[in-house]
């Protein structure tokens, strides 16, 4: 397994597990952010396939998530189902955390849906111990509530 900075061409290899309409909408938005420098992403790959991704936003309109100075936001964090349960998600997360440190940011936020307490617990075990806020996810039809958590990191 190899972790590296993703490139826009990698999006074609990341369409597993997403609904087609959502892929088109979000990939367009993400590609724009990458080109503008407000975000980047890391991928986890085998010899043949990309099996994981995590996006890092350096700056967002919602500064509670990422403020462009000290706080970065992680999202679209996923591992292909065939590769889950092997510690690869943790390894990818740790690489993202290291990248945030390399950019001299001192805080990371991440969201988990309110109906996913097991994911909230995982993030808490990984050091996301501060509650920032609840938000309504406008990009999804049901508009579920997600919890924004914060981790302070040492450079």
Image: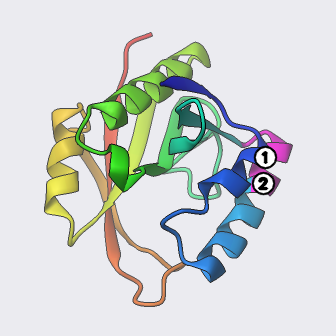
User: Image quarter for residue 112?
Assistant: bottom left
The spot of residue 143 in percent (x, y) is 41, 84
* Residue at 41% from the left image edge and 43% from the top image edge: 109
Identify the residue shown where x is 44% and y is 25%.
97
Q: Which secondary structure, mark 1?
A: helix
Does residue 27 sit above or below 130 in this rendering? below
Q: Nearer the viewer, residue 1 or 91?
A: 1
Determine the main secondary structure of the stretch shown in magenta.
Answer: helix
Is residue 152 inside the magenta stretch? Answer: no
Depth check: give the residue in front, 73 or 63. Answer: 73
Q: Name the residue under label 1.
A: 8
Q: Quadrant of residue 34?
A: top right
- Left/right placement of residue 112 relative to residue 52 reads left
Q: Position of residue 28 (x, y in %)?
A: 77, 65
Q: Residues within 10 Å of mark 2 (few under 14, many from 20)?
A: some
Which segment is the magenta one? Answer: 31-38
Q: Residue at x 54, y 77 (%)?
A: 19
In three-dimensional space, the C-alpha distance between marks 1 and 2, rounded to whole angstroms, equals: 7 Å
36 shown above or below 12: above
Q: Where is residue 145 in the image (x, y as percent from the top left)?
A: 32, 75
Q: How many marks?
A: 2
Report the residue marked by disc 2. 31
User: Which residue occupies the foreground of this view, 73 or 115?
Assistant: 115
Query: Would you say residue 34 sits in the magenta stretch?
Result: yes
Position of 106 with respect to 112 (left or right) is right
Q: Report if residue 87 is visible in the image.
A: yes
- Circle 1 crowding by C-alpha within 10 Å: few under 14, some 14–19, many from 20: some
Instruction: Return the disc, 1 or 2, that comes first in the chain's sequence.
Output: 1
């Amino acid at each position: 397994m190899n972790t590296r900075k993703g490139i826009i061409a990698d999006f074609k290899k990341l369409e597993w597990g997403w609904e087609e309409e959502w892929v088109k909408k979000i990939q367009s938005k993400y590609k724009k952010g990458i080109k503008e420098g407000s975000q980047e992403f890391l991928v986890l790959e085998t010899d043949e396939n990309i099996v994981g991704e995590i996006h890092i936003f350096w700056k967002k309109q919602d500064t509670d998530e990422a403020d462009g100075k000290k706080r970065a936001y992680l999202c679209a964090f996923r591992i292909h189902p065939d590769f889950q349960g092997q510690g690869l998600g943790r390894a990818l997360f740790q690489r993202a955390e290291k990248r945030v440190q390399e950019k001299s940011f001192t805080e990371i936020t991440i969201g988990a849906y309110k109906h996913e307490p097991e994911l909230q617990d995982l993030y808490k075990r990984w050091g996301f111990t501060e509650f920032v806020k609840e938000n309504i996810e406008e990009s999804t039809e049901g508009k579920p509530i997600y919890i924004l958590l914060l981790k302070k990191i040492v450079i």
